[in-house]
Every structure is written in C-alpha cells, then in structure tokens.
C-alpha cells in the first residue's frame, strides 16, 4: 500500500512538472507573438493555455482523491496541499500568458505595443520566460536555495511594470486609447505571471523545510 501511495505522490510531482513545462512554452510563444505580431504563435499560445487549465483541473482531482483515500500526514500531507496550491498558480500563469497572446491576436495585423515601449516589453517577456523555465527545474529538484534565488529575480519585473505606468502617465505619451489599454493590461499580466512564479517557489520552500514563514512572498 505504501508503495502505491509513493507512486501516486510521484505522479503528482510529474504532472506539476508537465504543467510547468507547458506554461513555459505558453509564455514564450505569447511574448514572441506580442513583440512581433505573430498571429500563429498567438493562436498556439491560446490553445495551449486552455489545455493547461484542463491539466491543472485533472491534477487537482488526483490530489483530492489521494487525500481522501490515503489520509496522509506530515510531509506527505504538505506535498499534496502544496501541489493543490501550486497547480492553481500554474493554471493562472497559463491563463495570464494566454491573455498576452490574445492582445497580440486581437491587434493583428497591427502591433500590440508601440515602438517606445517595445524594449521594455522585450525585457519583461524574456524575464518571464527565464523564470518559467527555472520554475520547471525547481519543481524537479525542490531545492530550497534555488527557490530563494528565483524569488529574488522578481524585482526587475516589478521595476519594468512600474516603468510602463510611468511612461503611459507621462506628458510625452501620445498613443491612442487602444495602445494605452493594451500596454497597461499586458504589463500587469507580465507582472502577475512573475508573482506566481515567486509564489510557487515559496510553496516549494515550505514543502522542503516545513516552515510556513518560507512560503510568504518576499
């Protein structure tokens, strides 16, 4: 019975990694579509985002079945509780990346971002992609030190997010209302995507150390 239980826990971790890999692919496609007005990549990101949501739901159902049948305690309970919360964050990350792709899709064949902010969004997108890929490795290793390294990288995304608002609210901003709405929303989606990476890395710290203080977003 214990071997079956451990096998189920391994499946939970494997599914988390699989969803995280999908999420990394979504944000990579979405940010490229946003920066280059590539409608094919945008459509691929949107479809993959929807599929990832279904995977997250299936994982939640698996974790709940294990909780109901096995009544785990101690670290095993932490694994399952953390998995449910991580799954929710991964699902939201996929949705946020899908929203970025949708902006590119709706503005095609026009650009989704004005030239004045393109370098900012290029950097923000690259950071989100890097964070997503690092998250995949974190979920494979559950290394608490690596988790803390990931959390520290969120600060630059926050800076870029604030810069977008500074530009949009500045006197030199002359773009139309559509651009204003698009870049404001897209910046928020990028920032929240990174926040969820931090949130998941905090949950991994909790999973590893058992200290709930480690799970607070820095």
Image (spheres, rainbow, N blue to C red):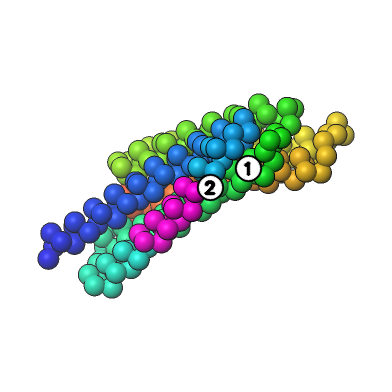
Q: Is residue 47 magenta?
A: yes
Mark yes or no: residue 80 visible: yes
Mark yes or no: residue 157 visible: no
Of the pair 16 and 159, the residue shown nearer to us: 16
Percent position of residue 212, x then y: 41, 56
Q: Secondary structure at mark 2?
A: helix
Of the pair 25 and 65, the residue shown nearer to us: 25
Marks 2 and 1 in Cβ contact (< 8 Å): yes
Range drawn in magenta: 46-59
Identify residue for label 2: 46
Percent position of residue 27, x then y: 51, 40
- As displayed, is residue 153 above or below residue 45? above
Q: Where, by quadrant of the figure, is residue 81 drawn?
A: bottom left
* Furthest residue in direction bottom, as rendered: 68
Q: Please indicate whether residue 193 sits to the left or right of residue 52 in the image.
A: right
Identify residue for label 1: 105
- Which residue is located at x 71 percent, y 43 percent? 182
- Which residue is located at x 82 percent, y 36 percent? 175
N-term mark: 2 or 1 = 2
Percent position of residue 50, x then y: 48, 53
- Which residue is located at x 75 percent, y 45 percent? 181
């Amino acid at each position: 019975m214990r071997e079956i239980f451990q096998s189920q826990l391994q499946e939970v971790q494997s599914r988390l990694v699989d969803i995280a890999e999908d999420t990394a692919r979504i944000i990579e496609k979405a940010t490229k579509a946003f920066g280059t007005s590539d409608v094919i990549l945008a459509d691929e990101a949107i479809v993959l985002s929807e599929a990832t949501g279904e995977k997250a739901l299936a994982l939640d159902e698996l974790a709940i079945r294990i909780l109901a049948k096995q009544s785990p305690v101690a670290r095993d309970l932490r694994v399952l509780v953390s998995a449910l919360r991580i799954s929710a964050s991964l699902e939201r990350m996929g949705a946020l990346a899908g929203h970025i792709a949708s902006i590119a899709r709706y503005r095609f064949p026009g650009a989704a971002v004005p030239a004045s902010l393109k370098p900012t969004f290029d950097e923000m997108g690259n950071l989100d992609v890097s964070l997503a890929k690092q998250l995949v490795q974190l979920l494979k290793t559950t290394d608490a030190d690596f988790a803390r390294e990931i959390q520290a990288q969120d600060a630059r995304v926050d800076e870029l997010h604030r810069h977008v608002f500074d530009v949009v609210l500045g006197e030199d901003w002359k773009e139309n209302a559509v651009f204003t709405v698009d870049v404001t929303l897209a910046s928020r989606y990028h920032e929240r995507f990174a926040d969820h990476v931090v949130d998941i890395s905090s949950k991994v710290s909790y999973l590893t150390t058992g200290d709930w203080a480690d799970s607070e977003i820095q």
